[in-house]
Structure formats: C-alpha cells, structure tokens
Image: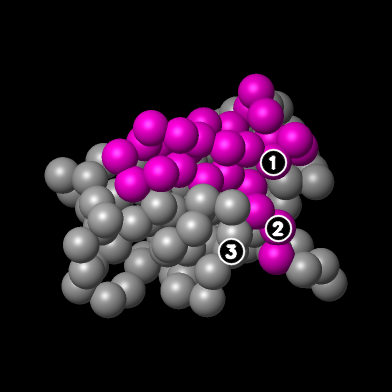
C-alpha cells in the first residue's frame, strides 16, 4: 500500500490551503490516520490525528482553531484544511497511517507548504 499527498503550495500569511492524502493498496477505513509536518532542520511534528471513522480527533496546540482534519473513507482520502496560515507553518506536510498520536513510518512522500509574503 501507499499514501500520496497533494495540495501543497506557496500561500500568503493569513491564507488558506487544503491538503489531500489518498491511500491505496490497503483497507483505508481500518486505520487511524495522522497529518505531520517537518520543517527544515527540525524533527517531524504531529499536526492532527483522526480515528478510523472520525469519531475522535486531536490537534497540536499550535494549530488548534486554524486546522481541521477530516476523512472520506469511501474515497480513501484524508484531508487537512488549513486557515489563518502563518510563516511558522512552512514545512513538508505528510500523512501517516496507523496511529492518531504519532507520525508513523508508513507515510507518504509529503507535499510542500510555504507561507510567505
């Protein structure tokens, strides 16, 4: 199986962006999922996580109230809606399978989000 992210872009501070992560080759609805990010020179950071049917959701304090994680199991897709973006949100964002509190090793290649004027 694999995960493929898309939707990253260059956006101005205060702007919005929606990331997508599509899974294939496995039962997407079986797994909790997470969004993580890694900025240059920093370790990976958990951004948000969601249980397999979306019953429970968690967010990093740094994105609460600005980011929303959702999933569409019928289309094997995980989303991250980002708003009020800040320069410190600049990072490669990737999705990971299996644990809503961790950035597991089963992950996609990532998509670049750059917040800059």
Q: Position of residue 56 (x, y in %)?
A: 46, 34
- Disc 1 to disc 2, how far (Cα)? 9 Å
The residue sitting at the top extreme is 65
**13 within the magenta span:** no
Front residue of 99 and 78: 99
* Residue that label 3 marks: 103
Q: Residue at x 59, y 59 (%)?
A: 102
Residue range in magenta is 44-70
73 or 42, which lies in front?
73
Tag 1 near tag 2, CB within 8 Å: yes
Q: Residue at x 70, y 65 (%)?
A: 44
Q: Is residue 38 visible?
A: yes
In the structure shown, which secondary structural element does the residue marked by tag 2 occupy? strand
Cβ–Cβ under 8 Å for marks 1 and 3: no
For label 1, the crowd category at 10 Å Cα-Cα, with few meaning under 14, some 14 to 19 and many 20 or more, is some
Quick check: can you spot residue 81?
A: no
Q: Is disc 3 placed on a helix, strand or loop?
A: loop
**4 horizontally vs 14: left or right:** left
**Residue corresponding to mark 2:** 45
Q: Is residue 88 left or right of residue 103?
A: right
Q: Secondary structure under badge 1? A: loop
Looking at the image, is mark 2 or mark 3 earlier in the sequence? 2
Q: Position of residue 92 (x, y in %)?
A: 62, 62
How many numbered discs, if any?
3
What sort of colour scheme is used for the picture?
A: one colour
Residue 52 located left or right of residue 84: left
Q: Quadrant of the C terminus?
A: top right
């Amino acid at each position: 199986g694999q995960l493929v992210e898309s939707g990253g872009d260059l956006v101005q501070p205060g702007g919005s962006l929606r990331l997508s992560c599509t899974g294939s080759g496995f039962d997407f609805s079986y797994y909790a999922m997470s969004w993580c990010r890694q900025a240059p020179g920093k370790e990976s950071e958990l951004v948000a996580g969601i249980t397999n049917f979306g019953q429970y959701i968690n967010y990093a304090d740094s994105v609460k109230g600005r980011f929303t994680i959702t999933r569409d199991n019928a289309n094997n897709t995980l989303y991250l809606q980002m708003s009020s973006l800040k320069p410190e949100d600049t990072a490669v964002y990737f999705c990971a399978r299996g644990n809503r509190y961790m950035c597991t090793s089963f992950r996609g290649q990532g998509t670049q989000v750059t917040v800059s004027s």
